[in-house]
Amino acid sequence: MAKSEEEYNTLTCVQLRAICKERGLVQSGVKKVVIDRLMADDNASSPESFPQKDDDIGIILGSPTKVVADKSFVKTPAKSPAASSSSIDNYEEFKDDTHTCILFEGRSRYLSPSGLHFIANHQYRPSEYTHLDNLLNPFWTYLTECLPLWLAPNMVTTLGGMHCGLAYAILWYYCPDFDNTPPDWVVMFAGYCSFAYYTLDCMDGKQARRTGSSSPLGQLFDHGFDCICTLFFVATFSSYLEIGGTHWYNLLQTSLQFAFFMAQWEEYHTHVLPHNAGKWIGVTEVNYASALAAFVFSIIDRDAFFQRSMEKTFAPLGLASLLPAPVKDMEVRHFALCGWGIMALVLMGLSVQRTLCHPRIAGEDMDASEIRFNRINAMSKLASPFLLCAAAFIVPPSFIRTRYLSVSLGCALSLLTKKMIIFSMAKMPFAILQTDIFPFILATIWIRYDARLTKEGADFILGVLCFWYAYRLLRWVNVAINQICAKLGIYCFRLKKRDD
């Protein structure tokens, strides 16, 4: 039942959040933020405020407001009459811009008021869980119950990310360019960190619900750390495959990071994040399998296993004669990377198929020209990460330090992925050509085609790019987090609500 602002002010925060829960709204924020959200829902549900016919009204995912299906405009009440004196009926308009096509991003480094509005009302929607997810859920819940109630969920996520960071640093020390195998204990420690990282990653959401502090910021933290931690997994596998200084390394890193970007790209267009392919295989299985693999590889002779031919590997089983001639001479590590590449292509193809056939892209009520535009627009948003990945293959791998190329490329792709994550929540347009891709692309062209450039000079250029992209990544994320915290009235690493 709709209430006036005065009536809402007489209620306690607990009562206000209980009303939000009943209506399916976000419960986080200080009292004024929660009241504004409830009043927005009251006005959005009011027939007088929305005179359109019922069949012209749609619901934006996770938002208590209504949206005109054709125009994608959201009307929400202004905070004060003075702030909206020029608007009709005291309303502001917020627009869902995910279908907007722009070539270059604007100069603004900040989230728009419309974007912050959508983030404040965003609700995360994962795909279905696998059998292993359901099996391990009681284990994750038990571990979460052991955490202190004062521990913020974002700190749980950060602790998981710190495991990856520590293991990555140790691998860097013992295997700087992925061309030698690290000590056995380092590989085993990397396996432990993989297990700890993903377990904590599964606990942060439960801690948020347990402490009543769920917020859209949690999704940014969770998926943001997942994004940067892909570099740790690349480093782990590359260290015992010893593929540094080759295009095999570029294949592994670009395929893994591009596939991760595509998962966020799919959520941007469908509002559902895919994390599994059926009931039997998903991110849980992949993460725990990688941890188990690291434990196993820490106790065997990795060089002897990965660098022998496929023919010798299958000979004891009597199956060597069944292998095609090109496969017989391949080393095990190269065959495994080819298998991963094929699997990554299949996963990317499935992502494209789901996205281009989704009702938001190709709905039954859309004509052919609109569907064609939506599909071209959706595919165009893959241009920037694709160009970054392609540029990595321009540089002769033996001419530069693999680590420098990996870090600069990894940070650049992580920056694009984090933008996609936040713009998906904010329903803001993601530009076809992101300006952050150009320094890396121009540097790789320079290194490839300048005959006067020495190896030391090429390494210096890539080293500068490492610092530049690390700064851009941290700066952009810091600005976004500060804006979101201010909008939601929360702290990043504290459960206490903000008074401002």
Image (cartoon, rainbow, N blue to C red):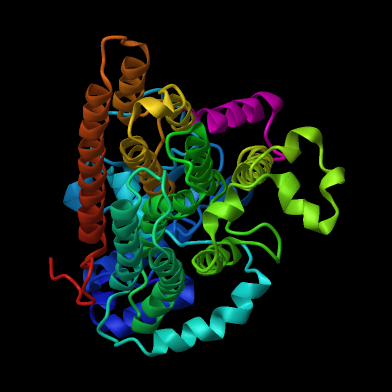
Query: Is residue 270 shown left or right of residue 177?
Result: right
Q: Residue at x 26, y 63 (%)?
A: 488
Q: Position of residue 426 (x, y in %)?
A: 38, 48
Task: Find residue 486 and report its horizontal and vertical position in percent.
Answer: 20, 59
- Answer with the quarter of the image where residue 201 lies: bottom left
Residue 450 rendering spot, x and y as whole percentages: 31, 11
Q: Residue at x 26, y 15 (%)?
A: 453
| Residue 389 vertical position relative to residue 418 in the rendered view, above or below | above
Q: Is residue 358 left or right of residue 432?
A: right
Asked whether 194 falls inside the magenta stretch, the response is no
Frontmost residue, 296 versus 223:
296
Is residue 16 depicted above or below 164 in this figure?
Answer: below
Secondary structure mostly seen in magenta is: helix
Residue 461 visible from this viewpoint:
yes
Task: Tell me if residue 58 comes above or below residue 286 in the rendering.
Answer: above
Left or right? Give the position of 10 relative to 153. Answer: left
Residue with the most extreme left position: 500
Span of residues in magenta: 363-383
- Report whether 364 appears left or right of 50: right
In depth, the one of 100 and 482 nearer the eye is 482
- Where residue 112 appears, as percent x and y from the top left, is 28, 42
- Look at 41% across and 64% down and name the residue there: 190
Q: Is residue 378 magenta?
A: yes
Depth check, front residue: 260 or 271: 260
Please count the marks in the image. Answer: 0
Q: Quadrant of the N terminus?
A: bottom left
* Residue under the image location 53 percent in, 48 percent down: 263
Inspect this view and state whether residue 272 appears.
no
Q: Quadrant of the C terminus?
A: bottom left
